Image: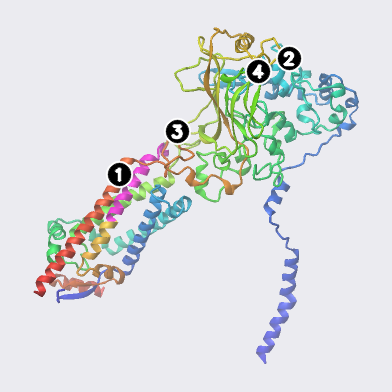
Amino acid sequence: MSNNTKKAYVYKGFERFWHWNQSLLIFLLALTGFEIHSSYSLFGYETAVDLHNKAAWAFLILIIFAIFWHVTTGEWKQYIPTTENLRAQAEFYLFGIFRNAPHPTKKTVISKLNPLQRLVYLGLKVLIIPVMVVSGLLYMFYRYPQDGGIEIITIDNLEIIALIHTFGAFILMAFVIVHLYLITTGHTVTSNLKAMITGWEELDVDENEDSKKENDEEK
Amino acid sequence: MSSMKNFTKALTFFLAIIAPLVIVTVALRQPKGENALLEELKAKYPIEHQAGVDHGKMEILQQDFTNPHEITAACLTCHTERGHELLQSAHFTWEREAYIPGRGVTYLGKKNLINNFCTGVQSNEGSCMKCHAGYGWDDKEFDFENQFNIDCIVCHDNTGTYKKASGGAGYPVMGENGPDFKRILANVGQPKSENCGACHFTGGGGNNVKHGDLEMALLTAGRDVDVHMGVDGLNMSCVDCHTAENHVMKGRYYGVSSTNTQRMSCEECHTAFPHQKSILNEHSIKVSCQTCHIPIYAKVNKTKMSWDWSTATRKKDGKAYEELDEEGNATYASIKGDFDWEKNVEPEYMWFNGTADHHLMTDKVDTTQPFLKINTLNGEYRDRDSKIIPVKVHRGRQPYDTENLTIIQAKLWDKEKGKGALWLDLEWERAIEEGMAYVDMPYSGKHDFVATEMYLPVNHMVSDADEAVSCKECHTPENGRLAALNDFYMPGRDRNELLDFAGRMLLILSLIGVAVHAVIRIISARKSNLAQTH
């Protein structure tokens, strides 16, 4: 490890609370969701449906708080996509990482994400999660063709909603697999994990960022 | 010292004020028994009807009646308007006015419809009318306008001694061999389950033959057979649910009914939101209560599941014979053909919106179909009025005219041999000729047998909530209860194979990619470590 590092408080309290709860909920939703899909039997169908619905509501509440946090702290800017270093970052994961090359993107408190992470996380936040939330809500509040139903909000077929929800679930699971692996690609195998638990991480000192960082901490 | 004083004060307060209150509360508290809820329901629902009149004191009923029409006349002297009501009742007319889309206004009922049990009443009235709430309907000339042709007692006898004679066209046995009519008339009242059951339990020619969920055992069985009628439970009677206003009863049997009117529903007592779990209440939008709460029917005695007329008329030693199963049910009878019987039957499931159509005697038989639908329960997923209901499907093979392509009404019964009745003469051709002549339908002289299905909604033998159909019995990819209803997507049963395959591949490729990446990282790290140490 480079000597030129400094311990920084990268992940704030709420951020970690949000991250770990989200991970638990996604894990629970996937576990129960695929049981509802009849991929296996674990909790029993009724319990699985019950847990899935409860976890869904918990997730919705968490999302509302997370959006509030992102907006009020300005942390949403972390996800603004950039093409700068995008290619270099991809090449790092494909080749550089095997030669022990340095990370092409410097991680700092105000720019925690490399360009690939920015793209993927942005995709999750504006595409996959909303698709799951909307299709999930439609799943819950789906109106069967019924007597006294309101014509314009009746959906005659659950199939399209169910298929979109299933599709999103597979994408999320693929994300989780890759995400869990990429945890190990920090400075050391466990440094990313420790950072997300404690909030603190050893970061390379960047002369340009130093003054800004100190300003941040004073606030 | 002061603390001691405080303690004494507190103790005094407790003993003087609190303790008596506690004792009084405990003493006054009604201990709630194990069956508190049941007792509560018992007090509320199976209400004993208290007669306002002692019919034993009625002068007009003190005669020695020899003619049942006179009994009816005696009833009508006080109940002046009931006769008119009964003339309109389906229990008497055996038909109803009903609009059926594609047919217009129809007048259909047991009077003129065919079924796939004994096939129909026409030309067999003398026998069938044992279950008619009237006297003397033995041919087409019966007077449906005559109030004195009504049989009041068959429904209102509370002694259980009144019996209509076999083959008597609805007349009871009278005279010396008959029951004590004075006693019967002194004990008339609201119909008991036995009254209803005399016909509704024995339809099709014997106990539980036809419906499967309506049989004699309901009179004596416990809650394990039917939660409502169980003698160890609410012990409700038929008319507790099937209430009547001016002799118009609630409840429909769609082997003969066609419209979504006068139906009896569970919701009337249980409301539309009876479950604590909203997801179960939500199911009730498209799933009837019966679907989950009647997991099996024919819980005590077997019911007839199929009837093949084509094997009838075989003889052994020149005589008609029967073959019985171990419970005494005929599996073959020369006069009727082959039967299948089943017990603890899982219903089949269909969409139903409360309207039905029927194959009329004048309708053509479509021989390109695998079977002919005797009655059609209308409904589909997209239909807003439709719900999934449990159905007993009775499968039959019965005669049809291969030239005119019409279903055949054969003459089965007569008082004596030699008049063409199949059950006596064991000869198809003559029985068909006589039957078709009676209904004024042409017969080409050529008949064969066609497979038929009849759909009987299952509404009774409601099980305890603990025994209701569980989620997984339907929400399962293989052989679920609703496997045949495939006009909608059901989670856990349905999936898109392509999407599932693609999804699985995505996950597998992700895992492989990650694994390969990790292995290369480990190998290259070792190499560079080696390079550094050397």
Q: Check whether the beta carbons of the residues at disc 3 and disc 2 lie within 8 A of each other.
A: no
Q: Chain of mark 2?
A: B
Check chain identity for marks 3 and 4: say if they share one. Answer: yes
What secondary structure characterizes most of the magenta part? helix
Task: Give the amino acid type for the residue marked by disc 2 in the picture.
Answer: Lys
Residue B320 in view here: yes
Q: Which residue is mark 1?
A: B501
Q: Residue at x 61, y 18 (%)?
A: B314
Image position, residue B49 (x, y; %) = 78, 39
Q: Nearer the viewer, mark 4 or mark 2?
A: 4
| Sequence order check, earlier mark of 3 and 2 | 3
Q: Residue furthest bottom?
A: B1
Q: Nearer the viewer, mark 3 or mark 2?
A: 2
- SS under mark 4: loop
Q: Residue at x 31, y 50 (%)?
A: A170
| Sequence order check, earlier mark of 3 and 4 | 4
Q: Which residue is mark 2?
A: B415
How many angstroms separate mark 1 from mark 4 (CA)?
65 Å
Task: Give the amino acid type for the residue marked by disc 4 in the picture.
Answer: Asp
Q: Which residue is mark 4?
A: B317
Task: Give the amino acid type for the residue marked by disc 3 in the picture.
Answer: Arg
